[in-house]
Image: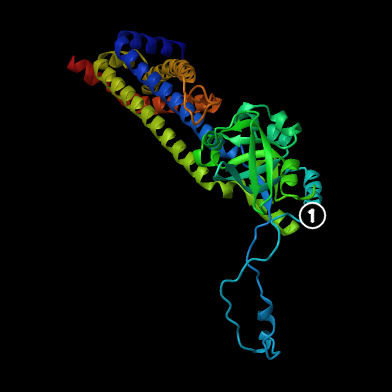
Amino acid sequence: MRLLIDIAVTLLRAKLRQSIIAAVGVMFSIAMFVTLLGFMNGLNQLLDGLILNRTPHVRLYNELKVSDQQPIDLVHSSGTPISDGGPYNIIRSVKPKDELPRLRNAQAIMDVLAKDERVLAVSPKLVAQVLFNVGTTDLTGQINGIDVLKEVRYYMFTDYLVQGEPYDLATGNNTIVLGKGLADLMEARIGDLVQVTTATGDRSMLRVVGFFQTGIADYDKVQCYANIKTVQKLLARPGSYYTDINVKLHDLALAPAMAKEMTARFGVQAVDIQTANAQFETGSDVRNIISYAVGIVLLIVAGFGIYNILNMMIYEKLDAIAILKATGFNGSDVQRIFLLLSIIIGVVGGLGGLIGGFALQKLIDHVPFVTEALPTITTYPIDYSLQYYIIAVTFALLTTWVAGWFPARKASQVDPVEIIRGK
């Protein structure tokens, strides 16, 4: 084998320029493959994170709906029940039940979920629809009452807080963090007081302690945050009044099954993160498919380059192949020599491609990315996952081996007698 390697290296040195071109083709393909996947997946994580980082794995809530059965449906005016063959009553414009959108026994539900080993964190939420009074203009808004410390720990609240401190919101009374778009419309600054009117007509003054920005303009013009006690006070509700329970799991894949389980167990509506954000997962999958497809095409093109170079080398080295066979080398030895040629090109090109890909990723990672929509993002996103490097090297070696196998097989079938006679 050592002798075969020496012969393969000698043939490479004899055609050094072509060998370098083939290795550069593999290197370029791997470098672009790694860079493209790292950049696309970094972009996917950024875009999906705008929503998914702020979304619980399972959300429990009480959805208002139309009453399933009206009293008039039960008994006819003559006293004949409908189930006994009485006439049907046609009712139009049936209204929902007159009940509050709160979760019943919310504290008991949270206590049970907190003891579940599959659950990482449980946090309550209270949503209030309000109007912000700006002079003679009323701006629609939604105040989310949250457990601030849990939001910071489990939902990356500080990543979207462009100004202010979350602990001012957690410890302050009658404090609020405004969406950046809404704050710009109101020309509000830190420390200003804003007037809020609830759906029942009650008015309150809240002090601005921060600005929140997700990068989604419509969201930032409506959504605001306060600690949950402030919102309960704003709505004149008791301390046990919650409209949502957010559940974070250890394993995201369990969310759909647990949502169904919670619906049946607690008698509330539950939606999992996959169902609530299916469009984002679809977009990420499509972008990943495109990235892998482009990268694989680049590697296949590099494989064709190696195939062509080895083919030309075989035609130019027919006399050398004939001499090898005439001096005792068999067809399998010749085949191994040319396979070694291909593998050496693939290994050298692969190592160069990994270094080049990492360098390009670092370069992109330091390119400034400035946009008003995402003030917390300063450079282009890159995912440095090791799997991209492993996939690139594996596929590159496989491609170069296949590209070298056909010419190597052709070389092993050369008849030395015919070559020498022709010479």
Q: Secondary structure at mark 1?
A: loop
Q: Is residue 56 visible?
A: no
Please say which color scheme the image uses.
Answer: rainbow
Give the image quarter of residue 31. top left
233 or 88, which is in the foreground?
233
Placement of the C terminus among the 4 image quadrants: top left
Give the vertical position of 411 relative to 62 (above or below): above
Left or right: 352, with 105 as reference point: left
- Residue at the image point whose x is 80% and y is 47% from the top: 239
Q: Position of residue 28 (x, y in %)?
A: 38, 20
Q: In the displayed structure, would residue 339 be above or below residue 46?
A: above
Q: Position of residue 105 (x, y in %)?
A: 79, 54
Residue density around tag 1, few if under 14, some if 14–19, many if 20 or more, within 10 Å: few
| Residue of label 1 | 105
Q: Residue furthest left?
A: 422
Indicate left or right for 211 with 126 as reference. left
Considering depth in this image, is 329 or 381 the residue closer to the camera? Answer: 381
Q: Is 412 located above or below residue 320 in the figure? A: below
Could you tell me which residue is drawn at 68 percent across and 91 percent down?
Answer: 78
Image: 45 above or below 106: above
User: Disc 1 residue type?
Assistant: Asn
On screen, residue 344 versus residue 63, left or right, reads left
